[in-house]
Image (cartoon, coloured by chain):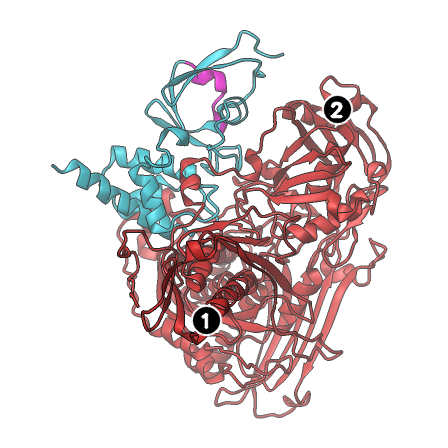
Chain colours: A red, B cyan
Amino acid sequence: MTVVETGAETDDGTSVGPRIGENAPRPDGVPKVTGDFAFSSDLHHDRMLWGATLRSPHAAARIGGIDTSPALAMNGVHAVLTHADVPGSPTYGLEHRDQPVLAGDVVRYEGEPVAVVAADHPDTARRALAAIHVDWQPTEPLVDPALAETADPIHPDGNVIRRIHLRHGDQAAAQRDDLVSVEGTYEVGMQDQAFLGPESGMAVPDEDGGVDLYVATQWLHVDRDQVAACLDLPHEKVRLTLAGVGGAFGAREDLSLHVHLCLLALRTGRPVKMSYGREESFHGHVHRHPARMWYRHHATTDGDLVRVEAHLLLDGGAYASSSGAVIANATCFAAGPYMVPSVEIEGVVVRTDNPPCGAMRGFGAVQTCFAHEAQMDRLAAALDMDPVALRLRNALEPGDRLATGQVITGTLPVAEVIRACADHPSAAVGSDEPMARPGGAGRTADAEHVVRGEAVAVGFKNLMFSEGFDDSSAARCVLHHGVATITCACAEVGQGFVTLARQIAGEVLGVNEIVLAPVETTSIGSAGSTSASRQTWMSGGAVQLACETVRRELLAGLATTHGLPIDDLVLVDGRVRSLSGDLDLSLAELTAEPVEADVVHRHAPTSTLDADGQGDAHVSFAVSAHRAIVDVDPDLGLVKVVELTTSQDVGRVLHPLQALGQLEGGAAQGVGLAVMEEVQVANGRIRNASFTDYLIPTALDMPPLEVAALIEQPEPGAPFGAKGIGEPPSISSTAAVAAAVRDATGLDLPRVPVRPSDICLVANPESGEAA
Amino acid sequence: MTNESGFSLSVNGRSRSVVDALPGESLLFVLRERLGLAGSKNACEEGECGSCTVRLDDETVCSCLVLAEAAAGRQVMTIEGLGSEGDLSDVQQAFLDAGAVQCGFCTPGLLMAIDALLENDPDPDDLTVREAISGNLCRCTGYGRILDAVDRAAEARQAEATP
């Protein structure tokens, strides 16, 4: 058997295809660097019209009436549609169908869609929006989530979207007088996913009365189901194709312009394109839930956690989106990756007239990680104990029980990631460069006053959907003339599934030519969502299963024909060989007739949470740690993150460069939430819906990321042992940066993002009122 | 309302006539929607994200902030002029080798900014690179692989320049 090294060539000079563990090239890499890759906003059709959306300028209002006739009378305007033009379900939603396609008699958040137009030019469409007359009757918006439970319902479904009361262990465990207790209240601001490619797509009407929708999304099939219900069309008449996705991070799980585009295309009989501007994008998708979290930790004087109590309040905004699953995650993981014998957590997510919130990378675990890690530091201080030692002492291990009562049966190297991160030597040195100081290019920091801080944080979450969700991914493998064609509806959003799918097929089938079929709804079943760190496991697993099925079928036939045990046959570089060397056949010739397999891959079933929040609700978990080193200018409240170090539980690395990219990119979003990113909402209205005012980290803001260790403990049940790696980097990074700023300044800083005023007005009380 | 007489733009060395454009159309809009050059991206259309970066003569600009007609008489270079499949520029190749491409939406703008940086400063230090690309937002990568790509491209360009 020929052993082929990575990147080497075989005897006959053909290059080796993609394999697991290698830095295989992205199949979409070349078109993405040449500008040829078609993102959803790049779609063009010669007959297309431009769609635009009229949105509510009020956070809460009644609509007395809508007069579209002035807009419809304009030259170049082809359609103006309102709620009255929605033929099917007037509402949609991921968990609850509670969000109107177009608002009818009431709006519940600023930016809620009210009407849509199609016109021959985007400027015409915008002018048409301005010509629509809406009889707005503004009402007092409900904007304080703390008042939502007692306020009059703003929606027929009520103001409490979900409440979970988790009780674990002896509820009287802390009723002793020999425990050390620490208490704190923490807040997390509203973060935006801020993907760069705006919401966009094109709908093309079909002669059969159906519609083709080309759109950037995270989950084609669930979009298809919701769109079809709103259009009152059978599923087969609503065909979705994935258009190029410019990032997602959770913000493309919900529908945005999908139904609007289809309505306009079906009404006008012409292709319609829509592309949100940045300001509209801030109103056009859900955000990360703002959170208020009260915590009390109790520990023995030796530092053993005894009990954690918490109350979590998440602001879901106007509509439910995935809030129910987010609060479940927040609650389940509220105590952190620690062994806590007694837990009581009440998690509530409420409805307000604030912008709707839903999925974002980390999905509820980001907010609670910030809080539980602040608590662990506070506890360490109260115990006069090293904060890393306190974490190691209480670190969860396989075999331990979570706060949900679930026993960890897979891998979870909590202590390993903490230790690797904390022990890693730092490369951070002080710099004399003014550009490297807090404040950066402004050169405003006085170098003499800059103080440095350092801290470690750790966080974890579930991989894949939880609470009994019947999660699956479908894949097809066709091996024909030695070429493997893979069909799977997994949405590539930038993460690199297209690379992994080819690596998996190459690894299993030993082929070098692998084609990925277009991603759409008619050719294959659902792949589930590109979220919850689930696609490597679910769709990667589906591709693996499909390829293995093909491989088995092919080899079983050959084994019979040649009288060899099937285990003696190997597929390598487009050939079938026997271990003895007697057999050496061309796969291309063997597959002159195609061999194919259709599979649906499921993970092990999970259960729901009972009335006490107990149950085996999750499939698997992943943990990460970050160490942050920061420089702070206390006079101006400016923070420079100097260095980040991370260690992560990855199961197995399938593609080293892509893995690194996930760790770096996720950490950047964590840094953003720690020190700069917040959707500022005042009386229900977004004040900073632009990249001028909503700041995401630039290359000057991001420190180098040191990877102390990727902990490779293969996860049972996962393809090749690989865990999803997308979310953990965004979980512990925010907590670590905030803690490092605390370490530098000695301030409590119970809220992220840490604003300059949180530092300088508190650090220098004489200079102004404390924030 | 439309500019019926039209105007011409020199894009990637070719003269392109633009007819029927509304007077307020940006260079970005004309490139994308009238000339079929969709490589320059539209992430903010207010000059903050750099996704629409093109070269106007020797200047790198956000094409969303340039009135299309104002670019007449100047040489416009877009990502489509940087290199094509089979003939990638050093920076494009470095992006692929370094793993700097994820969703790819920021990629064309970054490539244009980095190409211009290396033309002016073939051996930039880390802070210079970070400052030079700080007008180009990327949400996927955290910039680590992009910075590595700049190092790789700089090395390739210097190796080529050294006889």
Magenta part mainly helix, strand or loop?
A: helix
* Residue A387 vertical placement versus A463 (above, below): below
Q: Is residue A635 magenta?
A: no
Name the amino acid type tagged 2.
His
> What whole-number distance in Å separates the C-alpha atoms at marks 1 and 2?
65 Å
Quarter location, residue A451: bottom left
Q: Position of residue A54 (x, y in %)?
A: 73, 34
Chain under numbered label 2:
A
A89 on left or right of B51:
right
* Residue A603 vertical placement versus A428 (above, below): below
Quarter of the picture containing the C terminus of chain A is: bottom right
A717 on left or right of A25:
right
Residue located 52% across and 43% down the image: A196
Name the amino acid type tagged 1.
Ala
Does the rendering let one see residue A662?
A: no
Q: Could you say which disc has been placed on residue A559 in the image?
A: 1
Q: Pick the residue in front: A131 or B141.
A: B141
As drawn, the residue found furthest toward the top would be: B5
Q: Pick the residue in front: A721 or B20.
A: A721
Does the rendering let one see residue A154?
A: yes
Quarter of the picture containing the N terminus of chain A is: bottom left
Q: Report the residue marked by disc 2.
A: A78
Give the residues drawn in magenta, as a range.
B64-72
Chain under numbered label 1:
A
- Other residues around mark 1 within 10 Å, as few (<14) / some (14–19) / many (≥20): some
Q: Pick the residue in front: A267 or A93.
A: A267
